[in-house]
Amino acid sequence: MHENFCYVYVLQSLRDRKLYIGYTGDVAERLKAHNAGQNVSTANRRPLKLIFFEGFLTAAEARRREAYFKTTKGKVALRTILKESLGKA
């Protein structure tokens, strides 16, 4: 991963199989923080696994993509992209 990029990432809870979408400058550190319970939204859904990420040159682009993935249309697109990954147990 490139140090100057911002990333949109998708985590899947191994507990309830639900997805969490966020953005960060460091995917590995963010995943560690989620699995350490440092995020209120995912603390009770641990453990989590990283199933997708995309890199962008600016934080604004990453936030825009994150916002899109959180819309109904974006969730459909994301589930289409991740069809095989989400089908695995």
Image: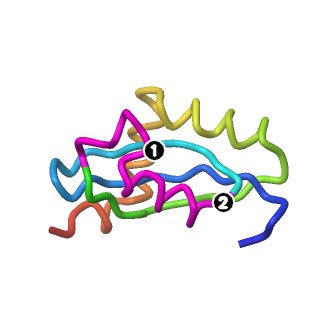
Look at the image and tell me in which quarter the C terminus lies: bottom left
Question: In the picture provided, is 2 more to the left or to the right than 81?
Answer: right
- The dot on residue 26 is 2
In percent of width and height, residue 47 lies at 26, 59
Residue drawn at x 23%, y 41% as measured from the top left: 44
Kindly identify which residue carries mark 1.
77
The correct choice, above or below, for 49 with respect to 10 in the image is below
**Magenta segment, which residues?**
26-45
Q: How far apart are marks 1 and 2 (CA)?
A: 24 Å
Mark 2 lies on a secondary structure that is loop
In percent of width and height, residue 61 lies at 76, 40
Label whose residue precedes the other's in the sequence (1 or 2): 2
Say what amino acid the circle numbered 1 marks.
Ala
Residue drawn at x 57%, y 32% as measured from the top left: 68
- The dot on residue 16 is none
Q: Nearer the viewer, residue 53 or 15?
A: 15
Residue drawn at x 80%, y 66% as measured from the top left: 3
Say what amino acid the circle numbered 2 marks.
Asp
Query: Was residue 24 drawn as part of the magenta stretch in this picture?
Result: no
Residue drawn at x 78%, y 70% as measured from the top left: 2
Q: Nearer the viewer, residue 42 or 83?
A: 42
Q: Which of 2 and 64 is in front in this view?
A: 2
Q: Nearer the viewer, mark 1 or mark 2?
A: 2
The correct choice, above or below, for 46 with respect to 38 in the image is below
